Amino acid sequence: MAKITYIEHNGAEHTLEVKSGLSVMEGAVKNNVPGIDADCGGACACATCHVYVDDAWLDKTGEKTAMEESMLDFAENVQPNSRLSCQIKVSDALDGLVVRMPESQH
Amino acid sequence: MEKNDAGVMIVGAGHAGGTAAALLRQFGYAGPITLVGEEPLAPYQRPPLSKAWLKGETDAESLALKPDSFYEEAGVALLKGEHVTAIDRTARRIVLASGATRPYDILILATGARARRLALPGADLDGVLVLRSAADAEALKARLGPGKRLAVIGGGYIGLEAAASARALGAQAVVLEREPRLLARVAGQTLSDFFTAYHRARGVDVRLGVQIEGFVGEGEVRGVRLAGGEIVPCDAALVGVGAIPNSELAEAAGLDCDNGVVVDLEARTSDPAIFAIGDVTRRPLPHYGRVARLESVANALEQARQAASAITGRPAPAPEVTWNWSDQYDLKYQIAGLPFEADAVVTRGDPATGRFALFHMAGEVIQAVEAVNAPAEFMGGRQLIAQRRPVSRARLADPSVSMKEVAA
């Protein structure tokens, strides 16, 4: 279990308890948090679950795969701390994680 | 939009309908929402049914679009296992199989499509299956396992994904395709050849240009009979030969239909109080100046966004380039766009490496891209399709020029 804070582009914050084993994307989508569309449901096929990981958490969220890197390359408004949230697995180590959302996923 | 008391009624609790309900709440719609579905389950994702779920890599809970608790918390009345028999447009209400009626101010039809079945002898035997719903998938999975034999009728996405998943479960698989190549309806020759070779190398018996005459067995299917009399033995036969839009309700209600419910870019039907979204619709494709009926999650979600935006008075979302994906073995296959008026195919990368992309060109404009384990080509291609911008075929064909540079 980890407490994760999702911050929408407009500043609205959603802090949720997310079960270990789920992805950061699933934590948002299952709780109907706006701003993470995740059209492909977590297959790393669409890049519509783009988030910015708070710098303090970058190391703990792990490495990007080549697949994720390539998908992100073409997402809008990519930054060095951009990730696809379907590729970040939630664990106790991510308790307190903060992610921000881009203006749009499309 | 004026606020009434009947609210939004969504008929069809699949990916499109479930997403529309959730988005209406995200977009601030405060009126009543009712979601009516025929299945005994809350909305769930169908794509994994032939992929990760079938292989046992994901469970029912993760298939669900939202947890069951969501509907009560969000004030969405979810009516499961209910069949809608009619729409009364004058009185603005729907009729349920029980005869009960429910009013609406806005109706969203998200009735989807159903698997086409074959009217052949033996088609009603146990073990002759289609794959559309979670119940279908349960029935298929129960018949797969080491030593079991799956016969797939139809070499489309569903059939090929099921064959790949069957192999992962230790079952044998044969794919019986009427056309001389796999994916004949949706992909070009290069890709058909690639998938044929890939499946054969993994033990799938791919048989092209074969005609099915029926299914044999006593009570249970034991084989598929081909023209000429040969029997292909099997423990399960999966029929994956396309889908038919569930547009009967709309047709009976007098809405404009043409192989699907005709909608505009707000997903609105010929009745301004009725929207339609997902597989059941025939919709404009602004990038191509055409209309088409699409069967994909991406389409369902785009139209759910269009309808929810229109209903809540938000600006219409920018039109998307249609896309889809398929997972088979270690392949991630992603496609974007549609190859209308394509006069040439540019190949980038070598299919023999299992990592390549095919760009369908109309002159210098990319109409569609098919990418195998080539996410940059898919993403870059999708962007270029949306921009309708001429690109150099030579640069596109040259893998030493990155997709970033091609798209720049």
Image: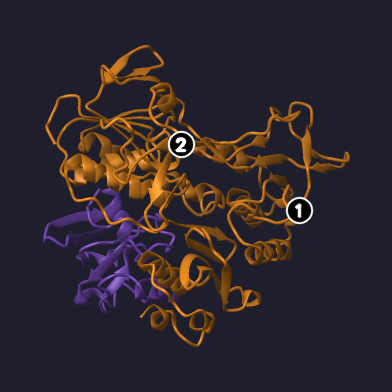
Chain colours: A purple, B orange
Query: Would you say residue B379 is visible in this rendering?
Result: yes
Q: Which element type, helix, strand or loop, lies under badge 2? A: loop
Q: Which mark is residue B267?
A: none
Left/right of residue A83 with respect to residue B135 in the rendered view: left
Q: Earlier in the sequence, mark 2 or mark 1?
A: 1
- Can you say which quadrant of the picture contains the N terminus of chain B? top left
> Going 30% across and 61% down the picture, which residue do you hit?
A106
Displayed quadrant of residue B198: bottom right
> Going 88% across and 39% down the picture, which residue do you hit?
B229
Residue holding disc 1: B208
Residue B334 drawn at (x, y percent): 50, 63
Q: Say above or below: B220 vs A53.
A: above
Left/right of residue B69 with respect to residue B339 in the rendered view: left
Q: Which element type, helix, strand or loop, lies under badge 1? A: strand
Query: Would you say residue A19 is visible in this rendering?
Result: no
Residue holding disc 2: B260
